[in-house]
Image (tube, rainbow, N blue to C red):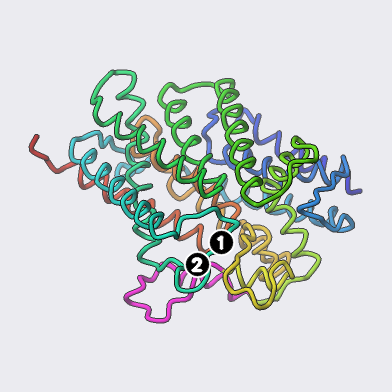
Amino acid sequence: MVVLSSLFLVFINFWILYSRRMKSIFNPIKIFSFFLAVYYTVPSVMFSIFSYENPFSPIEKSLLTYQNFLITVFVTVVIFVSGLIKKRNIKTFNYDYSSQTVFVIAIALMFLGLYVKIQLFLDGLYSVENKLTLGPSRLTRIQVFFRNIDLWGFLILSPIIPKLVYKRQKPITKLIYFTYLFVLIYFSIIQGRRTGVILPILTVMASFILYKKSSIKKLIPLGGIVIATLVSVTYNRVKNAGISFSQDVAQILMDSILARLFNPYTVLNKVIEQGSINDISGFSLILKGFVPSFLYANKPDLSIGNEFGKSIGLIRSNDNFTGINPGWLAEGYYYFNFFGIVLSAVIFSLLLSVFSKNTNLKYESSVLFLLLLIQLLSSGFQMEIAASTNFYFKTAIILWLITSFSSRLKVRT
C-alpha cells in the first residue's frame, strides 16, 4: 500500500508538470509542482519504494502510507482552490519600471543591506549556522529588517538586468548588480546557508529564462549549477561542523544534502508520529503578523520553530534558541491534524494566485511578482506558515509601491 500511495503522488506530480493546460513553465502551479517534487515526491519515492535510510533524518516508515495520503490531499486542495480563482490582468500590477529613479532606489537598498551585513559580520554575529549564537548577541527585529533590505533592491533589479545585458546598456548598474550577487553568495557560503546561496542563483537564472522566453530544456543547465553549488556549500558546512571525511566522502555529502532537501518530509513524519495539538488558533499568527510592531506592543514572534521543535522532541527543553522549520504541511497537521492540512493548503493556494494570476509576464512588474513566488516556493515552503506568508505578502506590497510610484519620479542625472 505504501508503494501505491507513493506512485499515486508521483503520478499527480508529473501530471501537473507536463499538463498541456498549463503551457508556460512559469505557470504558478507548475512551479509549485517542481518544488513539491523536490521536498515531498522524491523523498516519498526514496523512503517508500527504495527504503532509503538517512542517518541524519530517521523516520517511522509505518506512517508513510498515511503521510503520502496527506501530501496528496494538500496538492489536490491547492490545485482545486487555485482553479477557482479567475485570471484577470489587473492594470496596476502590469507596468514597466525601467527608470533611473528605480535604479537609484534599488542600488541604495542593496548598499544599505550590505553595510548592515558587514557590520554584523565584524561584530561576530555572522557565523556558520551550526555554531549557535547565544544570549544578548541574538539579532533584534530592526537588525533583521535592515540586514535583509538589500534583497529588495536585488529583486527589483533582477527583471531589468537581462534587458540591460542583451542590449548592452548601463554598464555601471550591471557591474554593481553582479558584484552584489557575488558578495551575497559569499556571505551565504561563510554562513553555510545553502538556501542563501541557491536562491540568488535561481533568481538570476529565472530572470534570464523569462526574458528570453526559454523552453523547459533550458532549465537543465540551471539544475546542474544548483546541484554543483549545493554540493560545494554542503561540503563547507559539513567540514565546519567537524564531521570527519575519513569515511566515504560522497556518501556523507549525499546524506547531508538529502537530509536538507528531505527535511519537510521527515519533519511531517515526526509530527504525525507525535500527534497534533488540536489548536487551530495557531493560524491566527498570520493575521497578527500583518499588524505593525509599533501598533502591537506585545506582538508575538511569527516563528514557532523553538516551541515546535520541543513539542515533537527534536530540541532539548532547556534550549531556547534553536528552531526547527516545520514546513507548511507539518505545521498544518501540528495545529489541527487532517483539517489543518486542508486549511494550510487553502491559504497556500491563495498566496500562489493572489498576484501571479493577475499579471502578464511581458511587464517587468509581473516578472518581479513571479520571482517573489519562486522565493516563496523554494524557501517559504519549508518555513512556518505565518512567517512565510507575511514575508511574501508584505514584500510584494512594498516592492509594488516602490516600483510603481518611484518609476513616475524623475532623477536629475
Mark nearer the N terminus (2 vs 1): 2
Query: Which image quadrant is residue 290 in?
Result: bottom left
Please report the bounds of the magenta region as a residue range: 280-303
In the structure shown, which secondary structural element does the residue marked by tag 2 occupy?
Answer: helix
Q: CA distance from mark 2 to mark 1?
A: 7 Å
**Residue 411, image x and y in percent?**
11, 40
Query: Which residue was labeled with disc 1?
Result: 385
Q: Is residue 274 left or right of residue 218?
A: right
Please report the residue visible at 67 percent of the width from the left and 58 percent of the height from the top.
329
> Residue 396: x, y in percent?
38, 51
Is 226 positioned to the left or the right of 53 in the image?
A: left
Residue type indicated by callout 2: Ile
Residue that mark 2 sits on: 286
Is 368 positioned to the left or the right of 233 in the image?
Answer: left
Question: Residue at coordinates 74% horizontally, 41% vertically from top-left?
Answer: 245
Q: Residue 248, image x and y in percent?
A: 79, 37
